[in-house]
Image (cartoon, grey):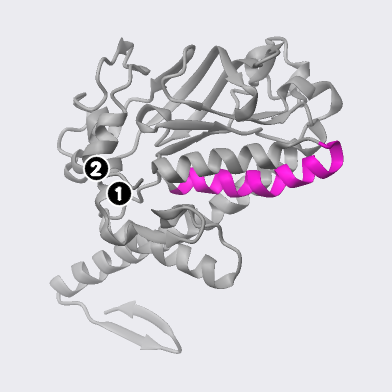
Amino acid sequence: MPRSAAEYINSVRDGRVVYYRGKRVDDITTHPIIGIAVRHAADLFDVKNRLYDDPNYGRISRYFKVPRNTNDLLERYKLIYEDTLRFDGLFNIVQAIGSDALFSLMIVARKVDRKYGTNYYDRVMKYYEYVVKNDLAIAVAQTDVKGNRAKRPPHEQEDRDMYLRVVEVRDDGIVVNGAKIHTTQGGPVANEVIVLPYRAMVEGDRDYAVAFAVPANTKGLKFIVRPVLEYDGNPNAVNAASRFEVESLTIFDHVFVPWDRVFMFREWDLAGQLAWTFATYHRFTAISYRAATANLYLGAALYAARLMGLRMHHTLGIGWFR
């Protein structure tokens, strides 16, 4: 069911554990800093052309339309490009990055199922249906803390929690421990967090080869938000005061994940494929919104040049000011 901006805002008042500058945030929607990111994310839900009629799931967000051909990718590019312009050059990522992760999971889950006889694809599609029907905002946590960079495989780290790992296997699911960094426009303002492997792995890394999804208010999940220095350290930054995204260190302190939300479990030889398949989808998203941002910069430069009385000349396709 498509949601409004108000419905989205109400959905993130759920008791999640968020810290900003060392203090627990009771309500992220009213926080003077994080609240700006919440309102920026909320604006996406009031965009009129965000929805389309899917033959299987009804009226859902265009961001969750699975690209199956070049035309679908072109439509996705236009959607991202236009929304970036709509949001003053700051792309609204709360459904784009989650869909990037879902698309990559659909591809790699099939490969794992074929090789190991698992049922990950069915789990992914069940979760996908849950996401699209509830019109959720999704964060992706992929980059591990990594620890000592001289030690390449995760299992060689002296502190085993430098990469997120499975620490307990139960009949009803798994328990994970560790942390992910650089969760952009992430868990602090999302409804769900999808966790993916960061890199290719070796057999000794089996406990680190894991992918899953959890609600943002899951017990043991903590978000440490990076201070927004563009605004928090510079109150004269007018643009940053109106829109920005938040980034977090996302801590998993013995977080339980039920089996139906586990999409990879110790299939170490395919962890790398999942990592770069997601990265490939997200690079498409990134170049789409950065094209819009680049045009805004170019337009601002041209406008400034005209104000100063400069004229643009073109020779052999090369432009300069005089």
Residue shown at 67% from the left, 45% from the top: 276
Say if 302 sits above or below 137 in the image: below
Q: Is residue 1 magenta?
A: no
Q: Which residues are magenta?
A: 96-117
Residue 320 found in image quarter: bottom left
Q: Using the image, tell me which numbered label, if any, was put on residue 44.
A: 1
Of 37 and 50, the residue lying toward us: 50
Left or right position of 205 against 293 = right
Q: Position of residue 126 (x, y in %)?
A: 58, 40
Residue shown at 47% from the left, 52% from the top: 57
* Residue picked out by circle 2: 5
Q: CA distance from mark 1 to mark 2?
A: 7 Å
Tell us which disc is closer to us: 1 or 2: 2
Looking at the rendered structure, the secondary structure element under dot 2 is helix
Looking at the rendered structure, the secondary structure element under dot 1 is helix
Among all residues in the image, which is located at the extreme bottom?
Answer: 316
Residue shown at 15% from the left, 77% from the top: 309
Residue shown at 46% from the left, 18% from the top: 218
Left or right position of 142 against 210 = left
> Do tag 1 and tag 2 residues touch (Cβ < 8 Å)?
yes
Q: Locate the N terminus by quadrant.
A: top left
Say if 298 sits above or below 273 in the image: below
Q: Position of residue 43 (x, y in %)?
A: 25, 47
Regarding residue 160, the answer to whether it shows in the image is yes
Q: Position of residue 234 (x, y in %)?
A: 21, 32
Say if 21 sits above or below 308 in the image: above
Q: Residues within 10 Å of mark 1 (few under 14, many from 20)?
A: many
Of 28 and 191, the residue lying toward us: 191
User: What's under tag 1, amino acid-wise?
Assistant: Leu
User: What's under tag 2, amino acid-wise?
Assistant: Ala
Q: How many marks?
A: 2
